[in-house]
Structures are given as structure tokens and as C-alpha cells.
Image: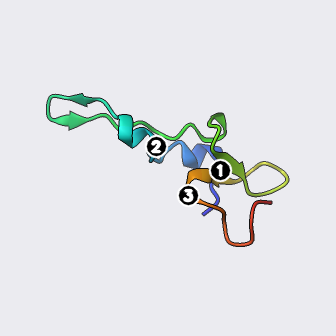
Amino acid sequence: MPLTPDEARSKWCCQARHTAVEQADRKIVIPCIAHGCMAWRWSDEHKKHGYCGLAGTMIGGDA
């Protein structure tokens, strides 16, 4: 699902989940950094929407 960078930043990063810091009994969730991440892929030529490349290629491939 393509998201704007602002929408993506409201989601947690699946890669960071493996390195999340445990403090007491709570886990700190690290948010997506959207187009600041090497895995970010733009889904349109105007660079308004994209997705996490770690999730695989979107149906129809990268734009």
C-alpha cells in the first residue's frame, strides 16, 4: 500500500523491531523514517507516495 512519507512515519519499522530497546516491561517502538531509509521505494514519478522495499515489490513493480 503506497503511503505518503508523513503517513509512513506513523507506522513502526519492521526492521527496527529486531533491534528495539527493552526498558523495564515496555518495548520502545521505532517509527518508519520513510524516504530517509535506504529501503524506501517511491511508487509514483512525482515522489508523493512510496512503500517499504523490505515488504517486497508491489504488484505491477516499482514505478
* Residue found at x 70% / y 50%: 41
The label number, if any, that marks residue 48 in the structure image: none
* Residue found at x 63% / y 44%: 39
> Which callout, 3 or 1, points at the residue further toward the start of the chain?
1
Vertical placement of residue 57 versus 60, above or below:
above
Q: In terms of depth relative to the viewer, which is nearer, 54 or 2?
A: 54
The residue to which callout 2 is attached is 15
- Is the N terminus in the top left, top right, bottom left or bottom right quadrant? bottom right
From the viewer's perspective, tell me whether residue 26 is left or right of residue 11.
left
Q: CA distance from mark 3 to mark 1?
A: 16 Å
* Residue found at x 62% / y 52%: 53
> Which callout, 3 or 2, points at the residue further toward the start of the chain?
2
From the viewer's perspective, tell me whether residue 16 is left or right of residue 8.
left
Contact between labelled residues 2 and 1, with CB atoms less than 8 Å apart = no
* Residue found at x 60% / y 60%: 56
> Which callout, 1 or 2, points at the residue further toward the start of the chain?
1
Q: Position of residue 33 (x, y in %)?
A: 56, 37
The residue to which callout 3 is attached is 55
The residue to which callout 1 is attached is 4
Q: CA distance from mark 3 to mark 2?
A: 10 Å
Q: Position of residue 47 (x, y in %)?
A: 78, 48
| Amino acid on which disc 1 is placed | Thr
Q: Secondary structure at mark 3?
A: helix
| Amino acid on which disc 3 is placed | Ala
